[in-house]
Amino acid sequence: MSQAIADTHSNEERKRTLPSHLVVCLVIAMSLWSKASMRTVLKNLVDGLSEKWVRVGQYWRVPCKSSITEARQRIGCGVISRLFHLVVRPCATVKTPGAFLGKMRIMAVDGTVFDVPDSKANARVFGYPGCRPGTQAAFPKVRLVLLIETGTHLIVDALLCPYRIGERVKVKKLLRSVTEGMLLMWDRGLHSYTMVRATLGRQGDYLGRVPKNVKFPVDKVLADGSYLSWIAPDGKSKKKGATKISVRVIEYTIDTDDQPQVYRLITSLTDIILFPALLLATEYHQRWEVESTIDELKVHLLGRKTLIRSLNPREVVQEVYGWLLGHWAVRSLMFQVAESAHISPLRLSFTGTLNIVRRAVPKFQRLQAEEFPFFSPGL
């Protein structure tokens, strides 16, 4: 945290009732007590310190709502986003159940949208979704794209943008966190030539679903029923000298109650001995873990009708990254517990762990003064 504050020059110039370190913790805690008021969140955050204060005859008055708002505006959004990028990382090991395919770490990418309060500033920056002529949507919307480690549900990178910017545009920027030894999965809505080329450019492998209207010529049928083909560059890429890329296509059908569902996947994994079609078709459905992660964020962690409470865009960005850090805190704890018990982190209850964290926060505040340096009851 200290590094993030220093990197963004968010240190306060004088002693304050709400120093920067405490405000950063408050922004993260807003997601842990999502339905409480800001003053109540702050009370919960420092509740465990009250026993010490009583013993020494000291008392700390909880600041008013406007003081908390001013403190959030003072530190801005840069320090929270910087902290997020300093902290988050893939954590699974080859022993984590379901986290690897061979030696490749399984990753998935997807996006979601959510409402923000209907203020003029939010509407101007983030925009409303389209609706029928003569009507207007009730709330502005923000788009959030996520890169997750499927075996742990840890969010290892994220970007938010105005609603009008397409999901496919922002998702490509998340490829900055894809490295060699990762297998990236995506749904058909994110399929594109540039997505394939950019993933390969990061030395990663991919397994993605493609839309029905995309056709692939059959170059060579393989023994497991999949076949080799190629994907042609789009017009913009072609003008820049891009050429077609070889792909392996896997087609399979899933029987449902209504009618059979046909899936088509493309992948850079062409070795049918190490990666037979049935194995890849089975593994692809781990992509849905990103949907479960979004559910944890939007339903279990926050659970409000309007997920974000901030009226100004800078505080919206700040709150979203605090929200992501709150999810990271819960999920990283679940990973550590699961590793010690030699089970999959996905077997543990997210809601149950969240409740444990809420109860445990006051206990961690029963530290010695030198162990809790950013807060003093004498302020």
Image (spheres, grey):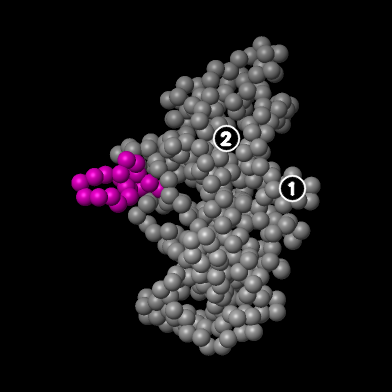
- Taking the spot 44% from the left edge, 71% from the top edge, the residue there is 212
Looking at the image, residue 142 sits to the left or right of residue 248; the answer is left
Helix, strand or loop status at disc 1: helix
- Taking the spot 66% from the left edge, 79% from the top edge, the residue there is 272
Q: Which residue is mark 2?
A: 32
Viewer-side residue, 59 vs 157: 157
- Closer to the chain start, of discs 1 and 2, is 2
Give the magenta-colored segment's residue range.
123-142
Q: Which residue is mark 1?
A: 338
The dominant secondary structure in magenta is: loop
Q: Is residue 221 above or below residue 257?
A: below
Residue 377's spot in the image, x, y percent?
62, 20
Badge count: 2
Helix, strand or loop status at disc 2: helix
Residue at the extreme left of the image, as rendered:
134
- Taking the spot 66% from the left edge, 76% from the top edge, the residue there is 276
Residue kind at label 1, given as amino acid type: Ala
- Please tell me whether residue 238 belongs to the stretch shown in magenta: no
Residue at the extreme bottom of the image, as rendered:
219
Residue 176 visible, this orientation: no
User: Within 10 Å of the Cα at label 1, are there few (<14), some (14-19), or many (20+) other Cα atoms?
Assistant: some
Residue 126's spot in the image, x, y percent?
35, 47
Residue 285 visible, this orientation: yes
Viewer-side residue, 87 vs 279: 279
